[in-house]
Structure formats: C-alpha cells, structure tokens
Image: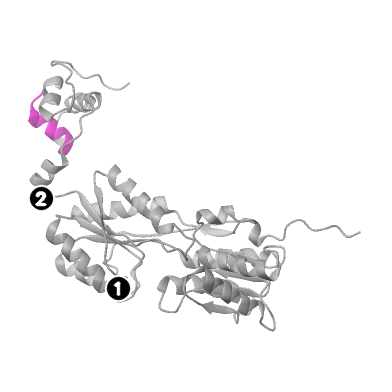
Amino acid sequence: MSPQPTSRGPVPHGHVTLSQVAQRAGVSAQSVSNALNNPDRLAPATLERILATVAELGYEPNLSARALRNRSSHLIAFKVRPSRPDKASLLMDEFLYALNRSAVAAGYHLILCHAEGDGSAEEIKAYRNLLKKTPVDAFVLAETHRNDDRVAALRSWGVPFATFGRSWDGDDSLAWVDVDGRAGTRAATEHVAAQGHHRIGHIGWPAESEIGEERRAGWRAACGERGLETDLEAAVPDTLEDGRQAAHRMLDAPRPATALVCASDTLALGVLRALHERGLRPGAEVAVTGFDDSPTAALVSPGLTTLRQPIDVVGRQLIQAVENLIAGDPREPQHVLLQPELIVRGSSLPGPRTPTP
C-alpha cells in the first residue's frame, strides 16, 4: 500500500509550490528539495511521506530554477530534416517521436534545430548558432558517416553528444546506439533463399553510404554461404524511381533475378511498381524485401516483407547515454547494437499453389 502523507496543512489549489508541499507534509522546504534531488540525505520514512505528498498534490519541480542551480538547462538538441515526397520511409519521424518521449520521461526537453542544406558545414553552423542563444546540455546526432565533421566540432566545443549510428571510424570513445543492418539484410536474404530462390539481387545505396555498405555486406555473406552468385546488384539513390529502374535492369538481365533484397522500403516499393508494370506477381514470381517497416509496407498488396528497427529502444538508450555523459559518468561510453526483426509478408512468399488437374 502506498504511504499516506501526514497532513499538517491545507490542500492547496491551483499551481502547487515547493513550500506548499513542505507545509502539507509537515517538513521544511529543504527536506522537500532533498527528496527530489538528494533522497539519500533523508530518513526512509520522511522520504516516503514527502514523495506521497508530491504525488497527492501533483507537484511538478521547476526545471528552470533547477537549471540555474545546477547550471543545467535539461535541453537536448536534435537537427530535423524535412520528409521527402520520393521516399516512403517515416523512420526518422518515428525516431524523433521516440527520442522526445524518452527525453521527457527522463526530465529533459528536446529542442529541434534546422540547417539550410544537408552538408555537415551547414549543420555545424546551426549547432553553433543554437549554442550561442540556448544553454543546451547535449546533442543527439543521426546518420553518422566516416570523418564526420559534426563529431569533431562538438568535441572541440566540449559539448556532450551521442549518436544514432555507430562510429564508422572505429572511435571507441564515441557513445552510440545502432541497429545491425548487416544482420537484418542477411536474415532477409536467408529468408528468400529458403523459399527456393537462387538468383537473388540486391538494390542498395551508393558506396559513400556506410549504412548501405553494411546492409549490402549482409546480402553478400548470406549468398556466399550458399554458393550463390552476387552479380546482380545496384547502388542507387534512395528513391522510389531509382528502385523501379534498378528492378527493371535486373529483370532484363540474361539470367534475371527471381528475388530482390532492398536496403530500404522506399527502394522495395519502387521494385513493386516495376513488377506491376511487367505483369509479375510479387512473391509468387519475384520475391521482394525492404528495410525499415514503414507504414506503407503493411498497406500495399501483397504486404512488403521488411526489417523492423526497434526505434523505441533506440530512443531510450540514446537518452540514457546522454544522461551518463551529462553526469560525467566515468565508465566507458555506451555502445549498443540492436537487432532488427524480420517481418514476413506476402511479397516474399510464393502463396497458395494451384493444384495440378
């Protein structure tokens, strides 16, 4: 049973202050402050009584005042990119929601910044301008790459940060959370191979994409273990149209693909469009897989087999990593590699066979 507060004062109405909590619980204002910030300084019975009163009155600590005392703003910054009409994935939108939810649960607020253009220089300029105007505690970066100038800039300024995406330079001092793209694409390739496919093509991203290279490596590994050729591959921009065109090329090959493993749902949906144009049935004639489990993947017919990323866990782990950095945790930086989940739908399954008369 929850402890009952000892009522020595009236129940306040409207906005509740720390002093009113203290009066209601029959303790000093300093004791209430200790309960919220330094609970180890209080006797267990006193701590329980104060926390019960806090819950009873719905008291919310003033984070602005706490920031002045602790020189902490409880603000975490993240740069947003606009959604593109030629991409089907809403992964970064889902990530932003998960990150914000985890930040709020930990007592932080997410502050969004925008940069003109997609280059690192523009993003670094946006970070610098934000820091001049706002006392940001830390940053979260996404879409990391080799020789990432954003990492060097934040380090030179002494600003804590964690990244969604590992250090592609092998820097163990970087705190990161990532999803294993190699394992995901490998699982997708193994799945279509188990359906009897031997001509398995891969449609991925250009070579400068470390994430794309990792996903391509999973396809190559799975094919290599089965003695399957890896001559059918394309490295294209991540758009519906590029996926469509790449599919047509692989289906026009002298020994065409019977399965296409794609680095994203966007590319895979472009492949489905190409199959429709050729009168080919997804799954029954050509297997197709994507990556990200976008909302569209479950809406198309047949549904798109794809890899689901544990975005909620990514958000929680990143906020935990940032909290540790802000607190000056002396332990090694957090490195978390999460596993995607293969979601099997009709685009990779042969479907019911027509019985032979």
The residue positioned 55% from the left and 63% from the top of the image is 290
Seen from the viewer's position, the closer of residues 286 and 55 is 286
**Can you see residue 190?**
no
In this image, 5 relative to 41: left or right?
right
- The quarter of the image holding the C terminus is bottom right
Q: Is residue 279 above or below residue 78?
A: below
**Quarter of the view holding residue 326:** bottom left
In this image, 114 relative to 186: left or right?
left
Q: Choose mark 1 or mark 2, whichever is in front.
A: 1
Q: Is residue 60 above or below residue 67?
A: above
According to the picture, the residue beneath numbered tag 1 turns out to be 119
Q: Residues within 10 Å of mark 2 (few under 14, many from 20)?
A: few
Q: CA distance from mark 1 to mark 2?
A: 32 Å
Q: How many marks?
A: 2
Furthest residue toward bottom:
254
Task: Label 1: state its secondary structure.
Answer: loop
The residue positioned 69% from the left and 71% from the top of the image is 278
Q: Is residue 53 above or below residue 274?
A: above
Amino acid carrying label 2: it is Arg
Residue 28 percent coordinates (x, y): 8, 26
According to the picture, the residue beneath numbered tag 2 turns out to be 71
Seen from the viewer's position, the closer of residues 12 and 171 is 12
Q: Is residue 33 above or below residue 259?
A: above
Task: Label 2: state its secondary structure.
Answer: loop
The residue positioned 44% from the left and 79% from the top of the image is 207
Main SS of the magenta part reads helix
Amino acid carrying label 1: it is Gly
133 is within the stretch colored magenta = no
The residue positioned 11% from the left and 21% from the top of the image is 23
The magenta segment is: 26-37
Asked whether disc 1 touches disc 2, contact meaning CB atoms under 8 Å apart, the reply is no
